[in-house]
Amino acid sequence: MNMQANNPTPTRDGSTTHPETQSTPTAGGPVPLAIPILTLIVTAFAIFTAFLGSGAIGGTPIAEAAGGALSADATPLAPASTAFSIWSVIYAGLAGYAIWQLFPAARRSPRQKHLRPWAIASVVLNAVWIWTVQFDQVWASILVITVLLAVLIRNMYILGEPRTGGWPDVILTEATFGLYFGWVLVATFANLFAFLSDAGLDIFQEILMGVAGIVAAGLIAVIAAIIDGGRIAPALATSWGLAWIAVARTEGSFESRLLVITTVAASTVVLLTALIAWALRKKATAA
């Protein structure tokens, strides 16, 4: 997460700047062009493989793979299918991120140097996750998505370093990986319930267990928003995922007013917490 120090830095005129917006000189020259090119190639291949495996360009959709273990009506925590449209935004951001790595600003950035291998790991793990589901290995999918979540947490931690790439850095790095992390947080809980239900643990088909799962996911997202100083992108993605879980619970096998109310409340609290944390951080920076 964003573990950066929040202490303002004095300037010559007596004003202060916050580490988040402060431009930091890069150490040494730009990385060799071969490294960004490799990043672009690996990212493009991983995104193509993910699209192929997801059924977006033919084949079996994820919701229908693994005997429907991850379908919208499989567990109390399964989101409606529309929720997965967020991947279009994430993939577009990842593609833009990989292309931007070729530019001098990214090649000179210490933050990008630290982030690059973890970013590559995240796109590769996503592709691996999709294929574990396509090969009906739900048990393996929960292992992969857990590692993916850990990698994305590491990414968010690195993003606490001073930004050096201007608005492209904000949009292609912070927004992209923020959305990625926020969505995968929700998806990890949905995947866990799918795995445990598929393994025959019927308690994970119960409404009250679904409520517990929603509360746990929301609590983690709230803690992340506070630690992270109110980054909006992760909260938006988490709230999006929770909202579509609520939509899915308005009909089908797990129709439940309690789940709908709990999920809507969790979605709202996550987003409000991030907005409040962001406002407080801005106020502290301006002080």
Image: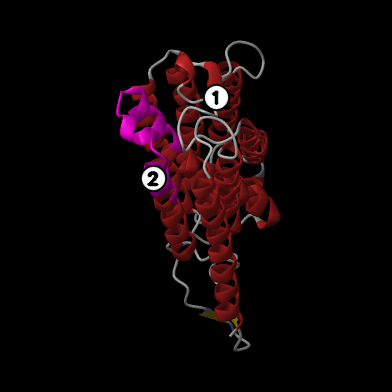
Q: Which mark identifies residue 208?
A: 2
**Quarter of the figure with the C terminus:** bottom right
Q: Position of residue 36 (x, y in %)?
A: 57, 35
Amino acid on which disc 1 is placed: Ala
Q: Which mark identifies residue 46?
A: 1
Q: Is residue 35 visible?
A: yes
- Mark 1 and mark 2 in contact? Answer it, CB < 8 Å: no
Residue at mark 1 to residue at mark 2: CA–CA distance = 38 Å
Q: Would you say 73 lies left or right of 92 here?
A: left
- The magenta span reads 190-214
Q: Would you say 63 lies left or right of 69 here?
A: right
| SS category of the residue bearing label 1 | helix
**Quarter of the figure with the N terminus:** bottom left
Looking at the image, residue 143 lies above or below residue 154: above
Q: Position of residue 252 (x, y in %)?
A: 56, 30
| SS category of the residue bearing label 2 | helix
Q: Position of residue 141 (x, y in %)?
A: 39, 26
- Disc 1 vs disc 2: which is toward the camera? 2
Looking at the image, residue 5 lies above or below residue 133: below
Amino acid on which disc 2 is placed: Leu
Q: Residues within 10 Å of mark 1 (few under 14, many from 20)?
A: many
Q: Which mark identifies residue 6?
A: none
Which color scheme is applied? secondary structure
* Residue 282 placement: quadrant: bottom right
